[in-house]
Amino acid sequence: MTALQTAVESLIEHIQKATKTTQRLTVKLELPANTDLIDWMESQPLFPKFYWQSRDSREEVVALGQIKTFTDPMAAEKVLSDQQRIWGGRSFDGRSSRNRRCLSSFFFLPLLEVIRLDGSWQLAVNLSEDRDKVLHALSQVTPDATEVTEIKSKILGRSYAPDFSGWSSMIGTALEAISQKVFEKVVLARRTTLKLDTPVAPAQLLKASRGSNMNSFHFMMAMDAKHCFVGSTPERLFLRQNRDLYTEALAGTIGRGLDPSEDNRLAQWLMDDNKNRYENRLVVDDIVSRLVPRCEFMNVAQTPELVRLRKVQHLKRSIDAQLNDQVYSADLLDSLQPTAAIAGLPRDKALDFISEHEPFARGWYSGAVGFLSRQRSEFCVAIRSALIMGEELHLFAGAGIVPGSTADSEWKELDRKTSTLCSLLGSEEPELERRSA
């Protein structure tokens, strides 16, 4: 990638001439259309590393190194200059009594960004007062990229937290609480730990997932070489462009059919099913109630649309709004996360139940991952995700529990969702059964 080397050298020249008040510099990149940013990212020595591809595939970014880190997104949003973006996310339960090991949020202003928007490329650098540190980091950037190899790892075994017996007990307790009007809905999750014959590299899993799972956000957040969170999620938390806001309720799930006829029959069943439509409506109502104080007006899709993914089909209702003046993206994070689609309703009662009954801490799973800037911010909901810690690989999935839920059918839904990533390792979940209409 000689064009990248030329661009880095050009940036170094610009930095040496920049005034003390300059905070960001960009240069245009001329890269081949088939350039793979995941390959290039994997070859770089700088951490943290962050990869982002938008759901419509129009934008792709690799952010490397850190000028500054933030645990409070609002503090970051107030000091960013135009065009600067911070990358990272908010965990589901970090720094709570339940999960002291995980940060409540982690955002960083990167040293370097490679950005593709449609067919055009840019290289950007954020500057700190210590210009020598920036120049030293830039000198470590290698223009060469070694191709990330296909996954060769095979699954030797898997364990679940909870196992099916624990899951059944937890579902029973949740349904009892719903019948007692403690909450209307709770989203309960399972962690699947895979034992592999050889470790899988985060970039391998990310690249394989990006190639297989369409209509999804793809992300990777690596604090260091040993700890990495990877996902391919269909669910947007929000996109904010100045005062325009776009969000959605994604809730209600069925598997894919073996052929077009079965696929359509399952889709129609999902569109007509009262339980799934009720679950989706709860999420819509919750989002609307949270946004009303922050919006001038709001439009909610009257009927759900069908979202077809590789392994599952979902119900989705789109919501767009015009924000009031002086609403920050950090405010929207506070309002919307965690949504009823990954926690439940009412939120606090559902969170209490999750904290008391789920046998593991979620950490980054079902948190929010993305970027924040003064003009534009976008976050996805971190579902269909994996935590890679050295040789350990944990996959996560959740299911919304409402009246009519059964432990067996919801367990199969978890299998379908987990297979989004599990199947990339040469194995489906054991004997996936499709729910019949």
Image (cartoon, helix red, strand yellow):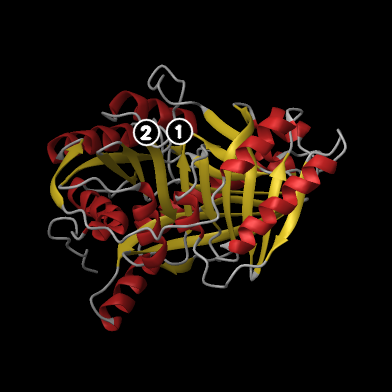
Q: Where residue 259 is drawn, which disc sits there?
A: none
The answer to whether the residue labelled 2 contacts the one labelled 1, judged by CB atoms less than 8 Å apart, is yes
Spot the residue most to the bottom.
Answer: 261
Q: Which residue is mark 2?
A: 362
Q: Position of residue 258 (x, y in %)?
A: 23, 76
Between 2 and 168, which is closer to the camera in this rendering?
2
Which residue in the protein does label 1 denote? 92
Quadrant of the rendering where the N terminus is positioned: bottom right
Alpha-carbon span between mark 2 and mark 1: 6 Å
Residue 425 position (above or below residue 77): below
Which element type, helix, strand or loop, lies under badge 1?
Answer: loop
Residue 83 visible in the displayed image: no
Q: Secondary structure at mark 2?
A: loop
The amino acid type of the residue labelled 2 equals Arg
Horizontal and vertical percent position of residue 241: 73, 53
Question: Of the residues under marks 2 and 1, which one precedes in the sequence?
Answer: 1
Q: Residue at x 74, y 32 (%)?
A: 131
